[in-house]
Image (tube, rainbow, N blue to C red):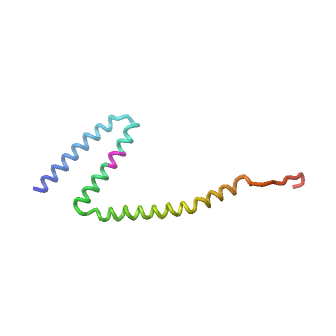
Amino acid sequence: MVQLLLLTAVALGAWGCWGYWNRLQRLPPELRGKALWRSALAAVAIVLLVLAATGRASWVVAAVATTFAFAHRLLALALRVLPVLHLAGRASGARIGPTLKTAWL
């Protein structure tokens, strides 16, 4: 019985996706890209919900947490290095102070 319900849900989902794809093809190109991004985000959300409902989302949560931790460390490093890069860029540009120009040098 569960397999029949799952098969029905997959069939209805495929039918809905087919209709949505046909509607996307009729959109102007400038709106099509935005609609495709929304569709991709919706698909990711649905996959995550299915994984969470079946109890298989633990690796996804771990991967997202690791990504956030890595991004946090990278941002902290970038904020520490940014003033040094700014000073280096300013030092390589125009010099501040007097310059000496003579006919002999």
Q: Residue at x 62, y 57 (%)?
A: 86
Residue 90 position, x and y percent, is 67, 55
Q: Is residue 40 magenta?
A: yes
Question: Given the current orientation, which residue lies at the most extreme left position?
Answer: 1
Residue 35 position, x and y percent, is 35, 41
Range covered by the magenta-colored residues: 37-41
Q: Residue at x 70, y 53 (%)?
A: 93
Residue 88 position, x and y percent, is 65, 59
Question: Given the current orientation, which residue lies at the most extreme right position?
Answer: 104
Residue 98 position, x and y percent, is 80, 54
Q: Quadrant of residue 82?
A: bottom right
Please state which of residues 46 and 20 is positioned toward the viewer in this rendering.
46
Quadrant where the image shows the C terminus:
bottom right
Q: Is residue 69 magenta?
A: no
**Left or right relative to 5: residue 48:** right
SS majority, magenta: helix
The vertical placement of 79 against 36, above or below, is below
Q: Residue at x 27, y 52 (%)?
A: 46
Please state which of residues 40 and 85 is positioned toward the viewer in this rendering.
85
Number of disc labels:
0
Please state which of residues 58 and 24 is positioned toward the viewer in this rendering.
58
The vertical placement of 34 against 59, above or below, is above
**Left or right relative to 79: residue 96:** right
Quadrant where the image shows the N terminus:
bottom left
Q: Residue at x 37, y 46 (%)?
A: 37
